[in-house]
Image (cartoon, coloured by chain):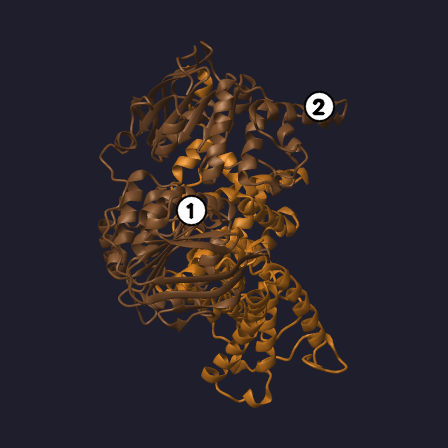
């Protein structure tokens, strides 16, 4: 019985095993494998449409980081994703699934663009006007995040449903605000396409590297925020409350924590991060708002936050990866004739494999660690719970 | 029970089962004879469940063999074990509440008439089995509407329906009332008289002595002794189980009750579904006494405790703690009055599983000095404090910085007890404090509860374990369908009287 061959551990030194042993850090295993798997499967798709995946990926890589300017452009492109993904990750930590970053980014961008065109601000010097405009965006996002948090705490309305609906409301209202010519609301009548007026030059965030898109101060603010969020979660009593509510809301309530208060606060802060991402793009990159320019940022941010396993430091890396891929896709299109959407396929597959991590765990035989570390988080607790 | 031994029906020989880092069973031998009840006794983690799971084909042994009717057998799955005539009733029933009895019984083994289910034949067989073994049940009743005892009968019928000859019962009495336990033992007797053989897993010593033909004690995955129920005593079995002498009765001095600390009047509370489960509940607990609430689970205890602790909205009535009205107070307000609360469900409420032991030890004090200063956590102070409590409460762990969910149930409970006993001077509310714990941990926790009383705190104990209530309490109340149906001094409370009150809500001595 003891030497039943079926029960002997299989011992095959294959590629998968070798790869698995090369990366020991359990927490990054699944995201890394998910990216690899996505690249392999997208490669098959690329072959099917008649291109060479190796050439395509090489062109993509050069497009991302091939020259110093391309690196800078990639970082610029990544900037809004950091703030938006941080918004989602922070809410995750409290067990909340903030699908509404899309709307919160848009509202933040709109309030920043609107406040930036106030006539009494036109001649105010930079050190004063920049904080005003940026904080307007932060406040707009915070209010738009507060609404679903408040509704969840007071009525139990699920934040996923509410934020999805609020996204649509934000998208349609902003489109109307910027498109409408009668009444004329935010539209710049002098512009040939629907967009808002330029904010004053003094209100623009300093550009550090002037590529297209530029690396502006917002990039460093976003990274500082990631560090701040890590600090809040790990070292403050508020962060402890957030993590407790996110991990076991019943125990949080039992221990005397204000669960509803935490939910409202976290959603407002989450919205503030997203609003900052929007305001950063207005003040740092474009100088005005045209509807549709942020389409998908908040949704991509969900994938980025999942890929980073809601870890604030992971957010920095995954956001840069995400933005760089979008930034590098142009060169891939030029060189190998592939549609830019090939990058979108890779990204969608990454999201699929991160969300359904059982697939990755099965293929690469990654064991779920019994003892979860503090940095792991139950991303799905937001679903179905009524607390 | 039955005299003399039949031929061996099931033999376990030298079974060893290891999990990564743990030897769950080591060279275990036991023999079950036809028509007998073999009690498998042991603390939590002694390897009882692993052993029966090996027998039932859920685990594959690493070594040793299993003989059924003298023939070596090897079950790759429980389906094969069932086919060979082994049935198992799990501690947590595997029933679908919205299905009827007959639907549950045939599930997975449906009798078909062409493409249709043939429930009539199944119904008839269920009635037959019921008559034969004394397991009367209506085949068309909805399982979710049956009592726990009746649901257990459905589980037994399920096994018998598949012609099980060997029945494995995993902690079958844990969920039953004292009356239901007696009834259940009747069924067990009936089954063995009709030639069935039973492996009965339990850690309740009283039951072992009244039902077993043969006792096997496991400790640390090994058989540490066999005992004859005619000669064994509870004390001798406990010593075998734990490996040292244990005391069952707590040495405590008579209570010196002081002022009323907790007073509830006309308390009415709804459960999550909006059903009123506590109605017009009056309660007084004094400083320096332990007031025990006995009752079968599901009679409103959970809602009562949650309402008292500010975790659940009340529909009516008032609650006072040390003279202050706390009817609408939050859990934090109540904690800050000097109240400790050991919740009924330790994983749902008591602990945050992935957090460290240290974080769990400060779960309700994390904002207070010295654990925090101006909103910042002071990890060093938390670590020092945790280290002290881990030592003081004998929490078995390599370090206070490991996730609390990796601890055994007993050690998890010690973490909660350690936390809730700190800074508590007024009131301690403990719900089911020793559920699922082993004899050693129970003794430890009971001592601590009595110590709190002796230091002058009022203690409200809510427990479904009658022995626990009887052992610890100075005064005893019985909860039945959400109302307090009787209050006694400990001296006037007998097992029988409480048991009847718990089961029917009527006091035999008042009625007589």
| Numbered circles on residues, count | 2
Q: Are marks 2 and 1 on the same chain?
A: no
Q: Residue at x 61, y 42 (%)?
A: B144
Which chain is brown in the picture?
B
Is B318 or B155 nearer to us in this picture? B318
Q: Position of residue A25 (x, y in %)?
A: 39, 44
Q: Residue at x 47, y 41 (%)?
A: B177
Is B375 or B471 nearer to us in this picture? B471
Q: Position of residue A334 (x, y in %)?
A: 63, 52
Is A312 or A374 nearer to us in this picture? A374
* Residue under pointer 1: A27
Q: Chain of mark 2?
A: B
* Residue under pointer 2: B121
- In this view, B461 is above or below A198: above
10 Å neighbourhood of mark 1: few (<14), some, or many (≥20)?
some
Please indicate, yes or no, whether residue B304 appears anywhere in the rendered image.
yes
Q: Position of residue A96 (x, y in %)?
A: 53, 59
- In this view, B505 is above or below A85: above
**How much space separates mark 2 and mark 1, taking CA atoms?**
55 Å
- In this view, A340 is above or below A121: above
- In this view, B206 is above or below A140: above
Kindly state the secondary structure of the residue where label 1 is placed.
helix
Q: Residue at x 35, y 33 (%)?
A: B205
Q: Are marks 2 and 1 in contact (CB under 8 Å)?
A: no
Q: Is residue B455 left or right of residue A217?
A: left
Which chain is orange in the picture?
A
The mark closer to the camera, 2 or 1, is 2
Q: Which mark is residue B38?
A: none
Q: Position of residue A137 (x, y in %)?
A: 55, 75
Kindly state the secondary structure of the residue where label 2 is placed.
helix
User: Where the N terminus of chain B falls, by quadrant?
Assistant: top left
Q: Chain of mark 1?
A: A
């Amino acid at each position: 019985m003891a030497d039943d061959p079926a029960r002997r551990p299989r011992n095959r030194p294959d590629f998968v095993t070798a790869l698995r042993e090369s990366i020991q850090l359990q927490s990054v295993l699944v995201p890394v494998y998910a990216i690899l798997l996505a690249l392999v499967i997208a490669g098959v798709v690329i072959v099917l449409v008649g291109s060479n995946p190796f050439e395509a990926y090489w062109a993509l890589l050069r497009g991302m980081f091939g020259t110093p300017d391309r690196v800078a452009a990639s970082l610029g492109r990544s900037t809004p994703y950091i703030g938006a993904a941080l918004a989602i990750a922070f809410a995750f930590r409290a067990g909340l699934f903030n699908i509404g970053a899309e709307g919160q980014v848009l509202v933040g961008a709109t309030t920043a663009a609107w406040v930036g065109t106030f006539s009494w601000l036109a001649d105010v010097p930079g050190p004063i006007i920049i904080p005003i405009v940026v904080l307007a965006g932060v406040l707009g996002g915070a209010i738009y995040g507060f609404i679903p948090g408040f509704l969840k705490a007071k009525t139990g309305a699920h934040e996923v449903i509410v934020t999805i609906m609020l996204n649509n409301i934000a998208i349609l209202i902003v489109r109307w605000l910027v498109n409408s010519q009668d009444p004329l609301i935010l539209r710049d009548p002098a512009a040939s396409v629907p967009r808002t007026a330029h904010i004053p030059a003094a209100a623009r965030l300093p550009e550090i590297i002037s590529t297209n898109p530029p690396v502006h101060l917002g990039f460093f603010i976003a990274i500082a925020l990631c560090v701040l969020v890590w600090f809040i979660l790990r070292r403050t009593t508020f962060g402890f409350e957030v993590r407790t509510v996110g991990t076991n809301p019943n125990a949080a309530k039992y221990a005397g924590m204000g669960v509803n208060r935490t939910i409202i606060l976290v959603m407002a802060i989450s919205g503030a991060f997203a609003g900052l991402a929007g305001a950063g793009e207005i003040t740092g990159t474009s100088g005005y708002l045209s509807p549709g320019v942020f389409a998908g940022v908040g949704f991509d941010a969900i994938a980025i936050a999942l890929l980073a396993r809601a870890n604030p430091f992971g957010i920095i890396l995954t956001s840069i990866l995400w933005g760089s891929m979008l930034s590098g896709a142009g060169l891939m299109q030029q060189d190998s004739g592939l549609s830019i959407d090939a990058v979108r396929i890779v990204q969608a597959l990454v999201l699929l494999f991160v969300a359904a991590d059982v697939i990755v765990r099965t293929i690469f035989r990654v064991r779920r660690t019994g003892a979860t570390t503090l940095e792991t988080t139950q991303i799905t607790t937001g679903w179905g719970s009524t607390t | 029970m039955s005299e003399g031994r039949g031929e061996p029906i099931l033999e376990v020989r030298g079974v060893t089962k290891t999990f990564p880092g743990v030897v769950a069973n080591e060279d275990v031998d036991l023999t079950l004879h036809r028509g007998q009840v073999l009690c498998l006794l042991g603390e939590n983690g002694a390897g009882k469940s692993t052993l029966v799971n090996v027998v039932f084909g859920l685990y594959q042994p690493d070594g040793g063999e299993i003989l059924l009717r003298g023939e070596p057998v090897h079950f790759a799955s429980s389906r094969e074990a069932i086919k060979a005539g082994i049935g198992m009733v799990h501690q947590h029933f595997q029933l679908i509440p919205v299905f009827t009895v007959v639907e549950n019984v045939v599930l997975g083994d449906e009798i078909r008439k062409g493409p249709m289910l043939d429930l009539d034949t199944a119904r008839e067989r269920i009635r037959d089995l019921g008559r034969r073994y004394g397991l009367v049940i209506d085949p068309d009743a909805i399982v979710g509407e049956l009592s726990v005892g009746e649901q257990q009968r459905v589980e037994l019928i399920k096994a018998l329906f598949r012609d099980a000859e060997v029945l494995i019962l995993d902690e079958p009495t844990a969920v039953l009332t004292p009356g239901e336990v007696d009834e259940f033992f009747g069924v067990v007797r009936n089954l063995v008289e009709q030639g069935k053989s039973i492996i009965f897993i339990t850690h309740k010593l009283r039951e072992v002595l009244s039902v077993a033909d043969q006792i096997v004690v496991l400790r640390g995955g090994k058989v540490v002794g066999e005992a004859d129920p005619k000669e064994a005593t509870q004390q001798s079995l406990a010593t075998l189980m734990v490996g040292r002498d244990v005391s069952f009765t707590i040495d405590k001095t008579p209570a010196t009750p002081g002022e009323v600390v907790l007073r509830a009047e006309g308390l009415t509370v709804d459960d999550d579904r909006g059903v009123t489960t506590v109605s017009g509940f009056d309660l007084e607990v004094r400083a320096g006494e332990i007031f025990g609430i006995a009752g079968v689970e599901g009679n409103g205890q959970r809602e009562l405790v949650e309402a008292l602790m500010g975790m659940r909205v009340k529909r009516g009535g008032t609650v006072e703690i040390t003279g202050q009205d706390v009817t609408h107070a939050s859990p934090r307000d109540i904690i800050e009055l000097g109240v400790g609360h050991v919740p009924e469900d330790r994983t749902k409420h008591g602990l945050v599983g992935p957090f460290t032991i240290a974080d769990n030890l400060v779960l309700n004090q994390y904002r207070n000095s010295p654990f925090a200063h101006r909103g910042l956590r002071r990890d060093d102070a938390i670590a020092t404090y945790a280290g002290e409590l881990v030592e003081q409460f004998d929490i078995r762990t390599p370090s206070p910085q490991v996730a609390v969910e990796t601890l055994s149930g007993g050690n998890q409970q010690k973490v909660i007890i350690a936390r809730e006993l700190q800074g508590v001077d007024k009131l301690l509310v403990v719900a089911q404090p020793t559920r699922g714990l082993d004899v050693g941990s129970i003794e430890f926790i009971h001592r601590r509860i009595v110590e709190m009383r002796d230091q002058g705190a009022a203690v409200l104990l809510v427990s479904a374990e009658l022995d626990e209530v009887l052992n610890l309490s100075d005064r005893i109340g019985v909860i039945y369908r959400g109302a307090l149906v009787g209050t006694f001094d400990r001296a006037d409370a007998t097992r029988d009287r409480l048991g009847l009150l718990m089961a029917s809500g009527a006091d035999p001595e008042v009625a007589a």
